[in-house]
Image (tube, grey):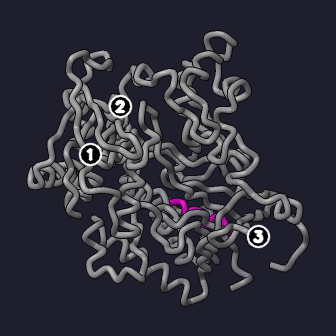
Amino acid sequence: MTEQPHLAVIGAGPAGLAATVAAASHGVRVTLIDSAPEAGGQFYRQPAAELRARRPQALHHEWRTWERLRDGLRTHVQAGAVRHLTDHHVWYVDRRDTRFTVHALFGPEQEEPVEVRADAVLLATGGYEKVLPFPGWTLPGVVTAGGAQAMLKGTLAVSGRTAVVAGTGPLLLPVATGLAAAGVEVAALVESADPKDFVRRTRALAAQPGKVAEGAQYAAQLLRHRVRTLVHHTVVEAHGAERLEAVTVAALDADGRVRPGTERRIPCDTLAVGHGMLPHTDLAETLGCRLDGLDVHVDDEQRTDVPGVWAAGETTGIGGSALSLAEGHIAGRSAAARLHGTEPDPGEWAAAAKSRSRLRAFFAAIDSVYAPPAHWTEQITDDTVVCRCEEVTGGAIREAVGELGAGDARTVKLLTRAGMGWCQGRVCGPAVAGLAGCELTPSRRPFARPVPLGVLAAAGEPEDD
């Protein structure tokens, strides 16, 4: 097996799993590297074995697809074609000539350095939630929509008894229905999108009847659980002394501003809020891959413009699990062919390419509807904490822009320290850009995550494969 070409796949979500199975099936030795203790990513997140969940499939749809991916991975691991490294946090990928070294930290404490050398790299690093602050968003009990879902899927627990699910995007539907099915009283689903905007995207929606049917199923579940749905509304403020006690929501006008007099207060102990997703591109950026806006640029084979580097899934653009599976399948097959020194046959992935094209068009239409309110920054008061790591307020950022002349997020960072904390601006980045009145752009970082100096000093020292 060691004489076979070696592909390192980073990320074991839908795209990474599909790519691993496809590449291993075509004679490539694969090392699958993931930060989670089990494969599946956020979409196929599983409860810990110690919880002895009797029906984990109740928290998922497309369970059979997951079983096929899981069983395929297991088969290739047992055959020695795939090495699956769990709890490995990749912080850097080094490219020298035609070889790559993936640097990772192993374990929950992320202290043990690990290096994986490969002939090619496939990035399937997924995405993360976009967070937009508002007064009270730092109260205990306020969580991201994805965080609420991860807690439910991974620990079979919920953060409270009464919840409001708010923001915008298709993720809100499974979060609201999942919480309701788990026994939580979902007091309201607050969606800022205007349903009338979907009328102008009927062609794209009609091309994906399965997705439309899926949305209808979620709507039926909301009705069954008597969840009140407030469309074209937004959260104005979260209230509470020691923890969340209530939220105020309000209707939006045609311009995306809060309509005075429409505010209503909803008692709750949990607010699950989300405003869409952003792609993880840190590793792609350090490798020098071209970006299209916030997305990693790829060709029809899912190749980046850096030789030997492929990318698939949310890192190339947010589009859900089905799109990630199609891209991962194409990327894995392409990488296998190229590593064997042959031209790939696009006919081998024609069905996946057709699905990819349709899904990209579908999610482009969806993204144009599921957008945060146009004037969301008006809800950020001067004393609202925007950067939690460095405790920088909205007022400090406005002062940097209005009085000190900052015209971009980087200058705001230099003047206020917003984005200099542990998350390196991943959480506060959209808010800082919004308050600065500039486009959100990738912030190229030397490493994808914090790394101990000792590990950094030892990186690159000779050692056996």
Which one is earlier in the sequence, the residue at label 1 or at label 3? 3
Q: Which mark is residue 113?
A: 3
State yes or no: residue 274 in magenta. Answer: no
What's under tag 1, amino acid-wise? Cys
The boundaries of the magenta stretch are 329-340
Q: Secondary structure at mark 2?
A: strand
Residue visible at 65% across and 64% down in the picture = 89
Q: Report x, y in % for residue 344.
A: 57, 62
Q: Locate residue 278 relative to residue 46 in the image: left or right.
A: right
- Classed neighbour count for the residue bearing mark 1: other residues with Cα under 10 Å, few (<14), some (14–19), many (≥20): many
Q: CA distance from mark 1 to mark 3?
A: 44 Å
Q: Which mark is residue 237?
A: 2
Q: Residue furthest front?
A: 241
Residue visible at 60% across and 71% down in the picture = 87
Q: Which mark is residue 268?
A: 1
Which quadrant is the C terminus positioned in?
Answer: bottom right
The foreground one among 148 and 199 is: 148
Q: CA distance from mark 2 to mark 1?
A: 13 Å
Residue visible at 85% across and 63% down in the picture = 454
Q: CA distance from mark 2 to mark 3?
A: 43 Å
Q: Say whether residue 333 is visible.
A: no
What's under tag 3, amino acid-wise? Pro
The foreground one among 101 and 226 is: 226
